[in-house]
Image (cartoon, helix red, strand yellow):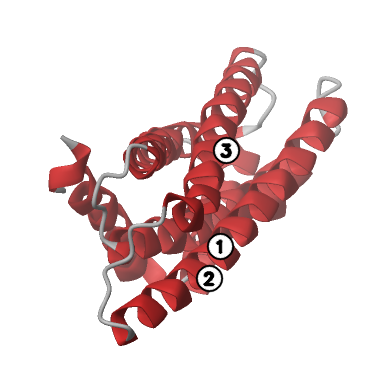
Amino acid sequence: MSSTQNLLDEHLIVRRLGSIAKKCSDGLYSNQNIPIEDIQIISVVIEEFVDAFHHGKEENAYFPVTQYKNSFSEDIRKFLIEHELGRRIAKMLRRELELLIDYDKYDQSQGLKWNDNKSKEPVARFLKSYAVFVFDHTGKEDAFFEKVQEKQSLSEEEDIQLVKHYELCKNRTGGQARIEEMIKLVGYLENRKWMR
């Protein structure tokens, strides 16, 4: 598989996660009972699979190789800015999720079950924001990757080197087993009762 196709294929997984985040957000806004653990899984997959692994491959390997080819530098600059936006949304989601967990623990200690829409609203908002980000960003990157393929911007040797570098990125994020676990977690979330 080519280095470009590899990233395009991962975008399918990233968009699946975007759909999960959107559905979770909608459920929280409609006061649906969604386990906090499932929201934590969404956050972990965002941080480990999307940001550390997928965006890491783009930022540390693919973009540096393609940056000065066919006037792609402006596109890549915008993608890097968008990656930072995604990271900030993910950090805000994590922060609000931790506050929600603390709130839930407080309610449980009082013998109450949390049911305060105000406490869930920030989590719902950042899940929705992340979903919007994912669909917009991956759509633009898909068009960029297709341009790279059409213009044959990467030599065969560059493509081989990128694929080898992807293995290093995989090892930095826990190896093949961890990546497979993240993908399984996406499938797990898709099959949760609240997703139907």
Query: Farthest bottom residue?
Result: 109
Quadrant of res 19:
top left
Q: Is residue 65 left or right of residue 35?
A: right
Disc number for residue 171:
none
Please state the horizontal and vertical placement of residue 5, each as a whole percent of the image: 46, 31
* Three-letter residue code for mark 2: Leu
Give the residue pinned by disc 3. 129
- Between 68 and 177, the one lying in front of the other is 177
What SS does tag 2 mark? helix
- Between 107 and 157, the one lying in front of the other is 107
Give the residue pinned by disc 1. 96
- Between 44 and 40, the one lying in front of the other is 40
What SS does tag 1 mark? helix
Q: Is residue 173 visible?
A: yes
Q: CA distance from mark 1 to mark 3?
A: 13 Å
Q: Is residue 1 visible?
A: no
Q: Is 61 drawn above or below residue 133 in the view shown?
A: below
Sequence order check, earlier mark of 3 and 2: 2
The C terminus, quarter of image: top left
What is the count of numbered marks?
A: 3
The residue shown at (37%, 80%) is: 105
Quadrant of res 14:
top left
Question: Callout 3 environment at 10 Å: few (<14), some (14 to 19), or many (20+)?
Answer: some
The residue shown at (65%, 22%) is: 144
Tell me whether the residue at label 2 lies in contact with that at label 1, contact meaning CB atoms closer than 8 angstroms. Answer: yes
Question: Callout 1 environment at 10 Å: few (<14), some (14 to 19), or many (20+)?
Answer: many
Please state the horizontal and vertical placement of residue 121, each as a whole percent of the image: 50, 48
* Three-letter residue code for mark 3: Ser
What SS does tag 3 mark? helix
The N terminus, quarter of image: top left
The residue shown at (16%, 48%) is: 192
Give the residue pinned by disc 2. 99
